[in-house]
Image (tube, grey):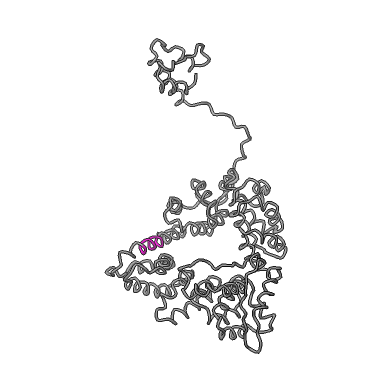
Amino acid sequence: MQWEHVIKVALLGTERQPLTLPATASNRLVASLSRLDTSDPEGAMLGAAALFAASRRAGWQPLLPSVALPAPTTAETLPECSPRAASHLATMLDGQYKEALPEWLALVQQQGMRVPARSLPALLDAGSKHGDIARALLPVLGERGRWLAAQNPAWAYLQENGTWDIGHIWDTGNTKARTVLLEWLRTTDPARARTLLETSWRTHKAEERRTLLATLQTNLSMDDEPFLESILNDTATRSEAVHLLTKLPPSRLVQRMIARVQALLRFEQGSLTVTLPEQCTPDMQRDGIKRKPPPHDERQPEHVQALYAEQGNWWLLQLLKMVSPALLCEQCAITPEQLVAAARLHPLREVLVRGWADALMNQPYDAAWFAALYPLLPADVLEQWFAVLPPPMQRTLLEQRLTAHLDSLRANLLLLASYQQWDVQLARTVLAGLRSMVGETTTYKEPVLFQTLPTIIQRIPFELIDEMVEHWPTDAKRWQFWVSRIGTAQELLCFRAEMHAAFHGEH
């Protein structure tokens, strides 16, 4: 007799589905069922249900595992972080102030500690979804965390590198596990990483191929060029392959691009002659040149959108992006200053400047080219360049731009949001400007300010927390619109300050 039979009798009724009781007693439960009075069908059914319920509450003897249990973890060597620090972690894992989690993990590592054991499953799950968390986890997992990561295939990305079963992870792991495996192999055995990707290329979906291909950026070399060249026909990953190939000047793709650009640009006696491409051939498209410009983008200035609308301009811009201008200078035996000076006087100056600027973004920082091109860089291009400049250059550039414009703060909000090494002097200057800007806004349509305000306030040094919450224009016309944004950013900054205090014994 089964529990399902009792349920069926209860649903259908004892008249339509008679209750069948066991005739012989094979155990105590069956013996009790066999003694029920069948002359009262409803009572017998309720009695059977009561007996089954009691038996189910009592439980069953657990089944013995069919496989050998893993060996227990070794003793911990790192101390666990303090309860106060652990409470901050719990807050972030619950979804509040989660932007600060990578910073919290970095603090744990700096203090030579490990994360609390009770938070390990949630942290391992978070790492499987976010690369910045995954990279920060391994040094602070502790012995139990490493042991736990080895028990779940979804957490294979965090197994100790030296003990990885490479074939098993590659065959059975998810995209995150494969990505972390390739990232590690690219630092130790780049050829093996490339071979794994090459031999299974067609078995991965397009999105996964793009993710895995990006790992070749580590220790990228001409050994990778044949594989990258071979996948240019794969439209799903062509852009990623082209991006990598442009970082290899000897590659066949770059050589083809140089030949195309040289046929369009001619430098003679200090003058630059530019011929626009007349068509976008299939070979050019295979090499990553897109035939049509992107759809209208409100983030782009209107004149830039108009510039892209001209097909010849659009094709030339893409060709220039794929060739380092330093190579052009070598070919023509001229300096960056000479080439830029000639471009300054040309009607297609903005196409040339934007193309060269994008090309230099993909190359190691070139001080000579930056110095030559900087005076001609449009504001939106300079914002993209800013992130790749050395920190001292970032600070110098900020100082120049903050003093060069009447509305300097508004014009440089994106640069300020990108700059991470704020000091007290810079923070006070920016705070004063932000209060003024918020007080002056008469409309909700301040997209750059709306976008960057939380990030900029989070850059304020902890020493200025008290000053940060004071002197905001609470009587401004649109204050109610800004107050929640400012308040959220202030709360995050205060939380980060408490995080640091927990690790440095402050109260």
Q: Residue at x 34, y 74 (%)?
A: 436
Is-magenta flag for residue 105? no
Q: Is residue 474 left or right of residue 15?
A: left
Q: Residue furthest bottom?
A: 269
Residue 255: where, in percent of width, then height?
70, 72
Q: Is residue 289 visible?
A: yes
Residue 125: where, in percent of width, then height?
52, 48
Question: Magenta residues, as a range?
Answer: 485-494
Q: Is residue 74 visible?
A: no
Q: Quadrant of residue 191?
A: bottom right
The C terminus sits in image quarter: bottom left
Residue 86: where, in percent of width, then height?
46, 51
Q: Is residue 129 left or right of residue 42?
A: right
Q: Is residue 404 left or right of residue 385?
A: left
Chief secondary structure of the magenta span?
A: helix
Is-magenta flag for residue 491? yes
Q: Is residue 455 left or right of residue 173?
A: left
